[in-house]
Amino acid sequence: MNGQCPPRWAEYLLERMLPARDHETVTGDLHEEYAEFLVPHRGRLRANFWYMRQVSSIAVRCIQEGGAMTKLLSLTSVITLLCGCWLALMECLLRHPGFVSRAAVALLIAAAGLATLLVRLLHAGIRSERRLWAAAAALIALGAYSFLRNAHAAHFEGFVFIISIVLVVQGVLMLATLGRNNDPGRTVAGT
Amino acid sequence: MADLMGSFELAVLLALLRLGDRAYGRAVLHQVQESLGRSVAAGAVYTTLDRLEQRGFVHSRLAAGTAIRGGRMRRYYTVTAEGSRALADAKVTLTNMWRGVKLPAAVKS
């Protein structure tokens, strides 16, 4: 049976995304389809692709059904993730003096975006709410630090200004949505 | 009530009726795909089933799982009396909407 199991990481991700009510039933259904039909008839590669597509569809629905505030939070997370990656890439390509530390900060910003997205999706699997509050506080602190640092810099960077504002908004939204997402009875639809 | 039901909800409810006491997530997914003639995301089916259950159109129960699914439980769905009424209403509404309508020749298959 081991050879006919979906990718472990995808199954882990799915389990963490789903509310307690659907843990066994939904993962069991997808596992059954994967092992009984997809692998024997379409091969392992296509079966893996199908499984990952199902996990993505459930992730998208979790975000879509989360209400306006969580959608905005997801959007700000994607923005900070992309901006952080872009900044880090540019720093590494241009290689101005001190680029290593700036690239590290940019990667930290990208990590903050990615972490918020994951926290939003995997909330059902995170046990300690205290960690989430700390993460939200860290986002606000990082945003405020970037804002102040940029304000006092010799050359004001509009791009960094936007990212710092987005980071603070992201942290505040995360704080606001924290309590609402902690319902164990939440269904796949996120309601 | 019928006018609030979307075509996908209709497809899921009809799939439950077709499957009878064999209607669990995977079987419903297959049935919906077959009736719509296209690939459907599992997330869409589970979301719709949850919504229908919240509206009282569907009732679910847990049952033991099989070895192929690692012993994980199955959730079986049945259409409630309210769901059946909604389906009947939807059928009447659709029939009324189509009454006297003739498709242009170019659209006919």
Image (spheres, grey):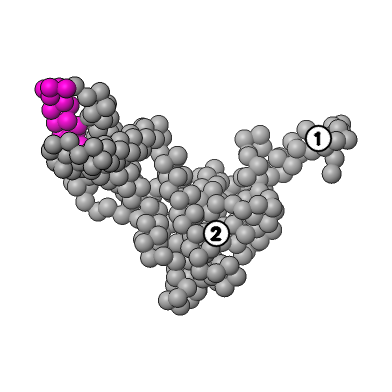
- What's the distance in space between the residues labelled 1 and 2, CA to CA? 32 Å
Q: What residue is rendered at 36% in x and 32% in y? A: A72
In the picture, residue B29 is in which quadrant? bottom right
Seen in the picture, residue A68 relative to A118 is either above or below; the reply is above
Please, what is the three-letter code of the amino acid marked with disc 1?
A: Trp
Residue A150 placement (x, y as % from top left) = 16, 26
Q: What residue is rendered at 63% in x and 39% in y? A: B5
**Quarter of the image with the N terminus of chain B in it:** top right
Q: Is residue B93 magenta?
A: no
Q: Mark 1 and mark 2, same subunit?
A: yes
Q: Which residue is mark 2?
A: B25
Relative placement, left or right, of A50 versus B99 is: left
Please, what is the three-letter code of the amino acid marked with disc 2?
A: Gly
Q: Which residue is mark 1?
A: B98
Residue range of the region highlighted in magenta in the rendering: A134-155
Residue B34 placement (x, y as % from top left) = 68, 56
Residue B32 visible in the picture: no
Mark 1 belongs to chain = B
Mark 2 belongs to chain = B
Relative placement, left or right, of A98 versus A183 is: left
Q: What residue is rendered at 33% in x and 50% in y? A: A122
Q: Is residue A23 or residue A35 the one in the foreground?
A: A35
